[in-house]
Amino acid sequence: MAKYRTLSITELESFEKEFISFLVINGIEADNWEEIKKNEPIKANKIIEQFSAVVFESIFRKNMFIDFISAKTIKCFQFLADSVQLIGLDAEEGSEVDFMKANSIRECIIQNEAHLKVYQSNKKYIKSREEEMYNMVQSGANLSKGELFKQIALLL
């Protein structure tokens, strides 16, 4: 089973230049690619799967932070070399905190500090760092620059 999903046609189109370079590096010229697509669709799909994996690996290698935000929970992850650090924020049941509606999460935190539980943990990777990131993104988390992670870390 592949580590990553295959890029959609729209996603592939946005990486057209990189895909052409990928084909050239792998010894496949434009005419040859057209022939493969037409006569060997399984091989063409395998090539696209390989390219998709390269794209995902590259994206996740360049990023360190992922955020997951819901109405009552914020989970921010920092992906280090061999472990992932979680800093989380949970709103108390019954509180009016709604991180999804807040104009500024920072202001929401300041105004509702008494109703928030802050926690952290650290975990070694089960799969590769990049696969762990991919699985979180596929589950609804988003890549980030780490600002929220750093803001919440100041509350600890």
Image (cartoon, rainbow, N blue to C red):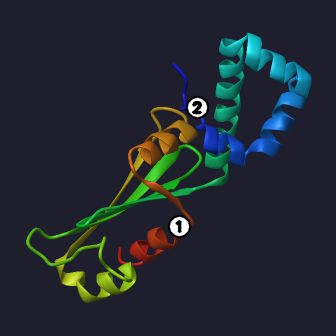
User: Residue at 90% of width from left, 23% of height from top?
Assistant: 31
Going by the numbered disc 2, the residue's amino acid type is: Thr
Going by the numbered disc 1, the residue's amino acid type is: Gly
In the image, taking residue 49 as reference, residue 155 lies left or right, namely left
Per the image, the residue denoted by label 2 is: 6
Element under disc 2:
loop
In the image, taking residue 74 as reference, residue 132 lies left or right, namely right
User: Residue at 90% of width from left, 30% of height from top?
Assistant: 24
In the current view of this chain or complex, which residue is farthest to the left?
Answer: 94
User: Residue at 42% of width from left, 72% of height from top?
Assistant: 153
Q: Position of residue 65 (x, y in %)?
A: 53, 58
In the image, taking residue 52 as reference, residue 113 lies left or right, namely left
Q: Where is residue 5 in the image (x, y as percent from the top left)?
A: 54, 32
Q: Label for residue 119?
A: none
Q: Which quadrant of the structure image shows residue 103?
A: bottom left
Say whether residue 59 is visible. yes
**Vertical side of 20 occupied by 17: above or below:** below
Which one is in front, 41 or 70? Answer: 41
Which one is in front, 82 or 74? Answer: 74
For the residues labelled 2 and 1, the Cα–Cα distance comes to: 27 Å
Per the image, the residue denoted by label 1 is: 146
Dot 2, how many residues are within 10 Å of its Cα: few (below 14), some (14-19), or many (20+)? some
